[in-house]
Image (tube, rainbow, N blue to C red):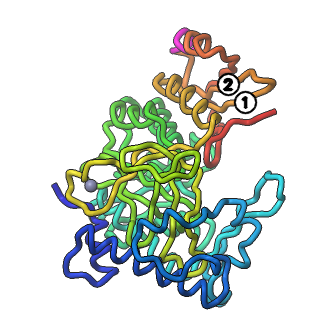
Amino acid sequence: MKKSRLDDLIRKQENLSELNRNILEEIQLKKLNALLQKEKERQGFYASLPAFLTSLKELSSLPFTTADDLRRYYPQLFLGSSSGVEKVLTEKTSGTTGAAKRIFYSKDDLAHTISFFAAGIGEMTQPGDKVMIGMPYTGPGSLGDLIACGVRECGGQPVQLCGESLYDQCRHYHQVQPSCAIDLPVALLAKARYYEYLYGRGSFPLRAALPSADACCKAVEKALREEFGLSLFPHYGSREMCMGGAITCPAHTGMHLREHQVIGEIVDENGHVLPDGEWGELVITTVDMQVLPLIRFRTGDHTRFMKEPCPCGSVTRRLDQIRRIGKDAETLACIENAFFSLHSVLDLSLTERNGQYQLELLLTDEAEADAIQKTADAQNLIYDIRIIKTDDKLLYSGKRFIHHL
Ligand SMILES: [Zn+2]
């Protein structure tokens, strides 16, 4: 089996003739110490931390950085000059502080992400493949743009998905006949199901897909693999790590973290570091970010490092399935697993009012009405059914969540 392309990328970016776990960890420690030193010199947000660690193990003694810190203290977290900023992402929040979370990227940060995307995309594409991109393109440096650059870097032909409604998007798929796609997991499944409803069973053109940007429940993954025969290469990333974090290799078991640029830890609810194999919260230290490096940032994402080395032989560790921490994410995953195993379900949205969950279902048709009724009864859910019309959009435009009224 071919080794993850990430190993080649690390060798190239770090100018190494060989790579093993020790060398990788030396690189991590060196970059971490350089960052700590810089923070001390500039009296930045992390100035109170030690300027030097003798081993990576000592990282666990440093305090966490939270999403709230990022909102409150981003000017102090900001490293370097504003002239080095190529892109700013602002995340509006409904939180109590009212402050928006801002993340800044340099040209180098974006270039690292593009090369990393190319490593992940290159696992599923062959030169010349048309790759349909479902992530939004909102200009240079946007997620859609970085993905398109990554596709070109590995010889593919990026196509930005057109159409507001699911019907128009399926028509665009029909015109383009892409062989691969990069999209949110449910958005991808909805297109596959509606496409085959419109154009016939077995007609969906994709061979492989890279689901990303949201949690992918088991039922959605299973449907993409089994109903549509897709080879899946899930990706994990977050804004704090400049969108690119972990990619799937030909072994299709877990996602390799770009550990030469992001140091990962898994911690329990009390903040204690857990050994590989145990589930907890992912904490990241983004040692290579040029403008806004973070030390021990709590991602709020629940996962684990897989214990065994990957069959592909990569030196990097793999993250297992990822979901947000908290009851909402668990509830949503449970309901998604129950309903997306039904073939007519294109999308669903969940609303909670006074402890009662209400479900809205977008369906291709009413063929599974009885099974839907039974599933909803088993989950004690009130539900509404909507049969898709040509101007219907998906129920979420980005990450999925529960509406609370
Ligand atoms: Zn692997």
Residue that carries the numbered disc 1 in the rendered image: 351
The range drawn in magenta is 368-372
At x 52%, y 45%, the residue is 302
The answer to which of 72 and 110 lies nearer the viewer is: 72
Percent coordinates x, y for residue 66 in the rendering? 65, 60
Residue 371 inside the magenta-drawn segment? yes
Residue that carries the numbered disc 2 in the rendered image: 359
Percent coordinates x, y for residue 169 in the rendering? 54, 46
At x 39%, y 46%, the residue is 320
Residue 193 inside the magenta-drawn segment? no
Which quadrant does ligand 1 occupy? Answer: bottom left
Number of numbered discs present? 2
Residue type at numbered disc 1: Thr
Tags 2 and 1 touching, CB below 8 Å:
yes
Residue type at numbered disc 2: Leu
Q: Residues within 10 Å of mark 1 (few under 14, many from 20)?
A: some
